[in-house]
């Protein structure tokens, strides 16, 4: 158990709809990263937050948005969903300074299926 | 230029044999970390091993070792005595400590262990 919690684990919805994915980082971790992994693809970096502020933005579509709340949990909002948005969405957290080795701690992912 | 390059989309190895998964990286940061993650078919991302840019010795974790060649900017993962449970996707990643604390992932290598 990485200590990063993602909900929901599975989500099936229709095109045009909007969904919210939620992530609770490890206790004490200030950084939250979001990644998208489409079928048989690598990890695409979407966005990073640090202590409530956006730190870096990757290949995140305009239809997607995210935020990190004062309690450090984060939400990724996906709107006007398209079939191609079907993917595994990972949240990961990392402590400031990286802790011992600086690795990312990943949640189990939210698997989104758009029909 | 790609920050992390994994040139082997797929690899096969006989059970109990050793296998090397290649990874090269590109950075101008003097301080960075290199990571390997395993993603089994169940989807979770499992941290395997870490190598710091200032570490003089190659990292080892059980059957995993990281062959770190700094001058060549390579960080190959060596798995000894392969087991059937090693069949998975393997991702190499890098974290640059001085330039935005970003994580960069490679496209992954799919390893299949043959009985």
Image: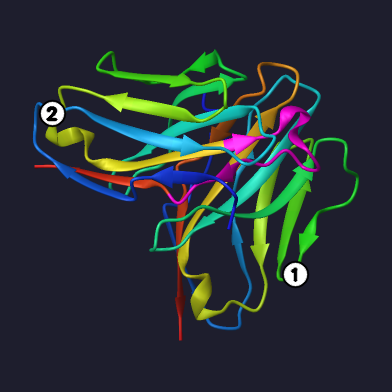
Q: Which residue is situated farthest in the front direction here?
A: A71
Q: What is the chain letter for disc 1?
A: B
Q: Residue at x 38, y 21 (%)?
A: A59
Q: Nearer the viewer, residue B78 or B103?
A: B103
Q: Chain of mark 2?
A: A
Say which of marks 1 and 2 sits in front: 2
Instruction: Please say which color scheme the image uses.
Output: rainbow
Q: Check the image and report above or below for B20 versus A112.
A: below
- Secondary structure under tag 1 reads loop
Residue B22 spot, x, y in % from top left? 59, 51
Out of B52 and A19, give the one closest to the viewer.
A19
Q: Quadrant of residue A41?
A: top left
Tell which residue pokes out farthest to the bottom in this image: B115
A108 left or right, relative to A53: left
Q: Do dots 1 and 2 share one subunit?
A: no
Crowdedness of circle 1 by 10 Å Cα count: few (<14), some, many (20+)?
few
Kindly identify which residue carries mark 2.
A17
Identify the residue at horizontal 15%, vertical 22% (top origin).
A80
The residue to which callout 1 is attached is B62
Residue A94 sits inside the magenta stretch: yes
Image height of B43 relative to A101, above or below: below
- Rendered position, A96 above or below A52: below
Occupied quadrant, residue B100: top right
Vertical comparison of A32 with B34: above or below: above
Considering the numbered disc 2 on the image, is that residue within a helix, a strand or a loop? loop
Q: Position of residue B112 (x, y in %)?
A: 44, 70
**Residue A23 on image: x %, y %:** 46, 37
- In the foreground, A28 or B95: A28
Q: Is residue B91 magenta?
A: no
Magenta segment:
A93-108
In the image: residue A73, left or right of residue B96 = left
């Amino acid at each position: 158990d990485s200590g990063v919690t993602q909900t929901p684990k599975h989500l099936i919805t229709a095109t045009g709809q909007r969904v919210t994915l939620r992530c609770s980082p490890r206790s004490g971790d200030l950084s939250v990263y979001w990644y998208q992994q489409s079928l048989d693809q690598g990890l695409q970096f979407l966005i990073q937050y640090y202590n409530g502020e956006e730190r870096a933005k990757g290949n995140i579509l305009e239809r997607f948005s995210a935020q990190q709340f004062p309690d450090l949990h984060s939400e990724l909002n996906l709107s006007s969903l398209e079939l191609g948005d079907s993917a595994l969405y990972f949240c990961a957290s990392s402590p400031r300074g990286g802790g011992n080795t600086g690795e990312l701690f990943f949640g189990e992912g939210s698997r989104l299926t758009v029909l | 230029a790609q920050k992390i390059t994994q040139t082997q989309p797929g690899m096969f190895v006989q059970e109990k044999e050793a296998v090397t998964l290649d990874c090269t990286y590109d950075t101008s940061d003097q301080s960075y970390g290199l990571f390997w993650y395993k993603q089994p078919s169940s989807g979770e991302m499992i941290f395997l091993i870490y190598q710091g840019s200032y570490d003089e010795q190659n990292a080892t974790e059980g059957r995993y070792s990281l062959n770190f060649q700094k001058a060549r900017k390579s960080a190959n993962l060596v798995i000894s005595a392969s087991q059937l449970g090693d069949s998975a996707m393997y991702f190499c990643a890098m974290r640059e400590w001085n330039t935005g604390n970003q994580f960069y992932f490679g496209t992954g290598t799919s390893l299949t262990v043959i009985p």
